[in-house]
């Protein structure tokens, strides 16, 4: 064999290898062709919006069970104390849930058997929360998106042993927003969330009271915790069956714990407060008939104005409030909120409103955009997959402070997702203790629906994102990938704020 043959042989084998790799790891998250008129919320990263197979888990399928009314979590009532504060009790407990008819399963929940109540707080309110752990394992109560000192944050530094309790006290010091709470114990956040520990935390204020938006809880303002669980194999909730090092994935969508949910609504504007509460799966939400809707709020509060969109992506941990105008639908019609080709929620228009829905307010907030300064104060690199995930080449160590920052001082952070040879994957970046602004994605303005307060964002493979961060409180705060299995494997660091 001469040199030329060797070169040809090499070339052919490389081609073959690439072809084999493509079949073994097909690109899973299909690209949507962006509609130029409505690409405000669409991912702009082109081919980077790929989530390689083998890490995307089983595809979602329709679970063979009759439609059921959407479970609306109860609102948790506080009791007011003589000092003007309001007291709440949140208990992590075991329970039995019959998500699948005829198959009661062992689950976890807050103050109930699966998921938790909605805790509704007001800006300026002084709150005490008694957290109780009735599980037979340690947990922690983390308030995702809440701007509180780190002794209240409930991260890995605040485990509560089985049977233990802790009392928290804080003053709500941020604007109206849809936040959430979930466990954060070292190494087992993924399993505990999968078993059912998660709940929503609303903040309301004088401004959200005054805005002409749907706000009747359970009537035209609905919480939607969207999750995936492995259910169609007929076995009960079993984290180890769903587990992969790149995320626990299910094959069945559940919304507030309901399979195939529907809601009976009026032909008016309805507001959906969406949380991607999945361990690892990214969602692309659309309406089945292709209609547009408006996003009104991102993680930490209202956007400056409603953003019209036809496709909304949420990565794990991320929230969005959207308003759907049903005034064009007649009594008896239905519209479905979809994730790709799987229905998330069916909206049945059951009642004609005599007066049609008012139009949305054009101004929702008065957020000032931070300047994108020249040199970032900090740079972070997310890399790896599976158990090899790391931030700046390191895995989480509770004894190590990775970054230092000053409270009430604005910084620019540049966060990079370093792809590997297989193309890498989206890492949802989350930072505790603060709401930040996205300054740029690969040097370009972020999409319009990312120009409000954020605490969780998609980091696409190969991408560099700049954010403006200003911690309101001192303490030690976590930053991590919100694929809970990556977090549990150590894709997490800590910043000391002084
Ligand atoms: Cu939603 Cu550190 O978590
Ligand atoms: Cu958090
Ligand atoms: Cu990750």
Image (cartoon, rainbow, N blue to C red):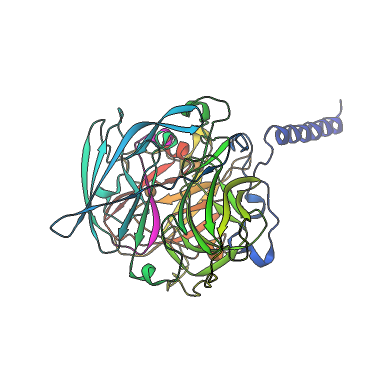
Q: As drawn, which residue projects farthest toward the left?
A: 82
Left-right relation of 244 to 480: right
Q: Say if the magenta span includes residue 416.
A: no
Q: Which residues are magenta?
A: 173-191
Picture coordinates of residue 444, whole percent (x, y): 57, 64
The residue located at (49%, 38%) in the rendering is 389
- The N terminus lies in quadrant: top right
The answer to whether residue 162 is seen in the rendering is yes
Picture coordinates of residue 350, whole percent (x, y): 56, 56
The residue located at (37%, 37%) in the rendering is 109
Q: Say if the magenta span includes residue 184.
A: yes
The residue located at (62%, 55%) in the rendering is 332
Left-right relation of 341 to 486: right
Picture coordinates of residue 439, whole percent (x, y): 49, 64
Left-right relation of 139 to 224: left
- The C terminus lies in quadrant: bottom left
The answer to whether residue 238 is seen in the rendering is no
The residue located at (38%, 72%) in the rendering is 210
Residue 378: image quadrant is: bottom left
């Amino acid at each position: 064999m001469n040199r030329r043959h060797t070169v040809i042989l090499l070339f052919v084998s490389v081609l073959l290898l690439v072809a084999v790799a493509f079949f073994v790891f097909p690109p899973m998250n299909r690209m949507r062709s962006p509609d130029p008129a409505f690409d405000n919320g669409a991912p702009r990263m082109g081919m980077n919006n790929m989530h390689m197979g083998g890490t995307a888990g089983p595809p979602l399928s329709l679970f063979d069970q009759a439609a059921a009314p959407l479970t609306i979590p109860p609102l948790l009532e506080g009791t007011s104390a003589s000092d003007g504060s309001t007291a709440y009790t949140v208990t992590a407990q075991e329970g039995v849930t019959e998500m699948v008819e005829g198959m009661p399963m062992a689950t976890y929940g807050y103050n109930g058997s699966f998921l938790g109540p909605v805790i509704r707080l007001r800006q300026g309110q002084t709150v005490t929360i008694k957290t109780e752990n009735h599980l037979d394992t340690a947990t922690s109560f983390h308030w995702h998106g809440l701007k509180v000192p780190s002794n209240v944050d409930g991260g890995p530094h605040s485990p509560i042993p089985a049977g233990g309790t802790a009392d928290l006290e804080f003053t709500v010091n941020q604007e109206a927003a849809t936040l959430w709470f979930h466990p954060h114990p070292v190494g087992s956040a993924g399993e505990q969330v999968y078993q059912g520990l998660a709940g929503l935390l609303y903040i309301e204020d004088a401004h959200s009271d005054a805005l002409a938006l749907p706000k009747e809880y359970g009537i035209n303002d609905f919480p939607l915790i969207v999750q995936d669980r492995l259910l169609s194999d007929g076995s009960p909730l079993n984290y180890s069956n769903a587990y992969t090092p790149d995320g626990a994935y299910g094959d069945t969508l559940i919304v507030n714990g309901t399979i195939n949910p529907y809601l009976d609504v009026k032909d008016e504007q309805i507001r959906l407060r969406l949380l991607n509460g999945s361990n690892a799966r990214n969602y692309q939400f659309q309406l089945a008939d292709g209609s547009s809707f408006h996003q009104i709020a991102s993680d930490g509060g209202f956007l400056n104005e409603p953003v019209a969109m036809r496709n909304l992506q949420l990565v794990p941990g991320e929230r969005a409030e959207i308003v759907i105008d049903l005034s064009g639908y007649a009594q008896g019609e239905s519209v479905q909120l979809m994730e790709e080709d799987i229905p998330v929620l069916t909206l049945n228009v059951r009642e004609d409103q005599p007066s049609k829905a008012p139009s949305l307010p054009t101004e929702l907030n008065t957020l000032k955009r931070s300047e994108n300064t020249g040199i970032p104060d900090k740079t972070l690199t997310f890399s790896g997959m599976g158990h090899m995930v790391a931030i700046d080449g390191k895995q989480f160590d509770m004894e190590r402070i990775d970054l230092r920052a000053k409270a009430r001082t604005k910084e620019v952070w540049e966060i990079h997702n370093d792809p590997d040879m297989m193309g890498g994957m989206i890492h949802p970046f989350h930072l505790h203790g603060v709401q930040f602004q996205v300054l740029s994605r690969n040097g370009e303005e972020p999409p319009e629906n990312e120009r409000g307060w954020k605490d969780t964002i998609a980091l696409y493979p190969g991408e560099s994102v700049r954010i403006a961060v200003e911690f309101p409180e001192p303490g030690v705060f976590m930053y991590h990938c919100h694929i809970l299995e990556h977090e549990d494997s150590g894709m997490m660091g800590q910043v000391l704020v002084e």
